[in-house]
Amino acid sequence: MMKVCTVLFLLRDNEILLAMKKRGFGKGYWNGTGGKVEHSETVEQAAIRECQEEIGVIPTNIEKVAIHDFVFEDKVDNIQAHVFITRSWTGKPTETNEMAPKWFDTKNIPYDQMWEDDIIWLPLILQGKKLQTHFTFAPDGKAVRTAELTVVSDFTLH
């Protein structure tokens, strides 16, 4: 079964906002904001809601840039992540009990403190590409066993 979730990155000039996950799934990793899509919402609505809940920012003009299928060899539930970027929002990124946001120069992204797959696809997103990917993770949940990546022209929003 695929759980649908979102990831959203704020971009400004040559910087990307990452947030240190403080609890739950992904704890101890830098990532974008995001989480599970609720039954009554679209992936776009979920991305906006999660960003507001996790760092106090309301993103506007979000753009879908990737769909990742994450398969974990030792788990029943796998994840389909819809990835978005935005260059516009209201509010100031603020630490919450779930995430601690920090701006990074896009040339100095802390990939060694992120999910192992991020270094494969995030640079392509930052170059303006849109992707559809499939990653299989080893039983430790961290090491990427296989990676498939396709550049796409666009996504149909739903």
Image (cartoon, rainbow, N blue to C red):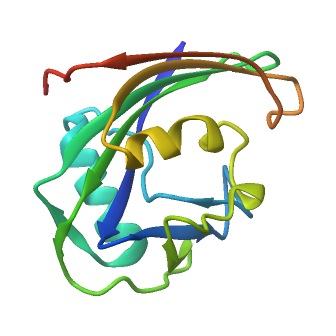
Task: Give the image quarter of residue 70.
Answer: top right
The quarter in which the N terminus is drawn is: top right
The quarter in which the C terminus is drawn is: top left
- Please indicate whether residue 51 sits to the left or right of residue 31 in the image: left
User: At x 69% / y 46%, what residue is drawn?
Assistant: 115
Nearer to us in this view, 87 or 40: 87
User: At x 80% / y 37%, what residue is drawn?
Assistant: 142
User: At x 35% / y 69%, what residue is drawn?
Assistant: 53
- Please indicate whether residue 60 sits to the left or right of residue 135 in the image: left
Nearer to us in this view, 144 or 1: 144
Task: Give the image quarter of residue 154.
Answer: top left
Q: In this view, does 17 lie above or below 113?
A: below
* Residue 149 coordinates in the image, percent (x, y): 52, 17
Q: In this view, does 134 lie above or below 94?
A: above
Nearer to us in this view, 3 or 73: 73
Q: Is residue 39 above or below residue 28?
A: above
* Residue 71 coordinates in the image, percent (x, y): 65, 18
* Residue 86 coordinates in the image, percent (x, y): 23, 58
- Please indicate whether residue 8 sits to the left or right of residue 64 in the image: right
The extreme right residue here reads 140
Number of numbered discs present? 0
User: At x 29% / y 87%, what residue is drawn?
Assistant: 92
Q: Is residue 13 above or below residue 51?
A: below
Task: Give the image quarter of residue 28.
Answer: bottom right
* Residue 55 coordinates in the image, percent (x, y): 39, 75
